[in-house]
Amino acid sequence: MQAFSITAPQTVGYQTLAKPTPGPADVLLRVSYVGYCGSDLNTFRGLNPLVSYPRIPGHEVSGIIEAVGGGVPEPWRVGLPVTLSPYTSCGKCPSCRRGRFNCCQHNQTLGVQREGALTEYLVVPHQKLFTSATLSLRELAMVEPLTVGAHAVDRAAAGPADSVAVLGCGAIGLGAIAAAAFHGARVIATDIDDAKLALARQAGAAHTLNSKTVDLHTELRRLTNDDGPDVIIEAIGLPQTFRAAVDEVAFAGRVVYIGYAKAPVEYETKLIVQKELSIHGSRNATPENFRQVIAMLEAGKFPVEAAISRVCSFAEAGDGLAAWHANPPAFTKIMVKLDA
């Protein structure tokens, strides 16, 4: 079988590998779609500290079950369309002992710490699979990136009583916007790109703010009766947006960080104490988040096709990464279609 790999920063190629064989508890997938994540872009750029080269990228996956191991139970059967959770858990670290397997200390994500899904075939433990009776293969490949934002909403325990501001309307931020709206919250989406803000409206945002053309503080106060949002979810990863989350959230509010700041962040720490803030990190997603997002997509609550900026053939997988690297704002989601 053929596999696409990033062999060094900004260098890609294809390799021929043996077709894998499923073990007793595994399924063999014929891969249909793989979506590119920001981690894949950073691997291509040489900026992902968790990656060694060469690396087969990709962890946003859909495919068709081609074979099942002898110990695989129903409903997993040949011909079923599926998506998957790309994470591992050791079962022994502090996170796992607390039942929070999504933030396992020793997690290995497909395409990051271990070889990924941009291959014709992939073997997966059946416990990692999810399916839907109605979603297309393209929609199933969108599930995993949306779960990351959905998990951030869960970390904030956001619901109908809350105003939720999401900083950043990339794929992860859109997932948070859609999940918060799906939970009944009133969502305020912020970005500096009007096209992405239009997508945020389609995903469920009640209000959108272009922070390049309006004063964020003034507008957030105006939209929240001068209180500030009950919840702020940071999905950009810049020092200034890390600080803005603490500055702008309401007293007794909740802040959730999904993005990594690429430089040290200095805070006015008195706000954390005076406001008695709850500040959470959010990593990966839980099985329940996968089920929530599938239900959200089945209900038609996310603009999947509008969010997909480009679909590449398997032969064009490198072109897609190069285009994203050259002009990041032009893309929300790039997918690679493997089966012709």
Image (tube, helix red, strand yellow):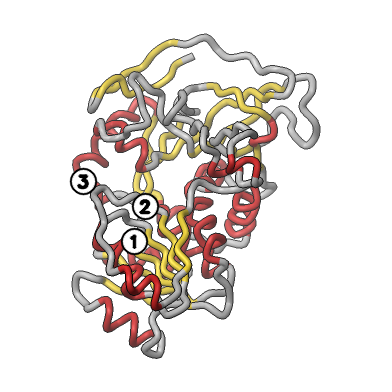
Closer to the chain start, of discs 1 and 3, is 1
Whether residue 195 can be seen here: no
Closer to the chain start, of discs 3 and 2, is 2
* Residue beneath disc 3: 327
Closer to the chain start, of discs 2 and 1, is 1
Callout 2: SS: loop
* Residue beneath disc 1: 168
Of tags 1 and 3, the one toward the viewer is: 1
90, 79: nearer the viewer: 90
Callout 1: SS: loop
Callout 3: SS: loop
Q: Residue 52, position in %: x, y?
A: 35, 23
Of tags 2 and 1, the one toward the viewer is: 2
What residue is shown at x 29% (from left), y 22% (from top)?
12
Q: Residue 275, position in %: x, y?
A: 41, 77
Q: Is residue 166 left or right of residue 64?
A: left
244, 274: nearer the viewer: 274
Q: Amino acid at mark 2?
A: Gly
* Residue beneath disc 2: 259
Q: Quadrant of residue 37?
A: top left
What residue is shown at x 41% (from left), y 35% (from top)?
336
Q: Residue 124, position in %: x, y?
A: 62, 27
Q: Is residue 113 left or right of residue 137?
A: left
What residue is shown at x 44% (from left), y 16% (from top)?
2
Image: 185 above or below 152: below
Disc 1 + disc 3, Cβ < 8 Å:
no
Disc 2 + disc 1, Cβ < 8 Å:
yes
Image: 94 above or below 252: above
Q: Is residue 97 left or right of residue 257?
A: right
Q: CA distance from mark 3 to mark 2?
A: 20 Å
Q: Amino acid at mark 3?
A: Asn
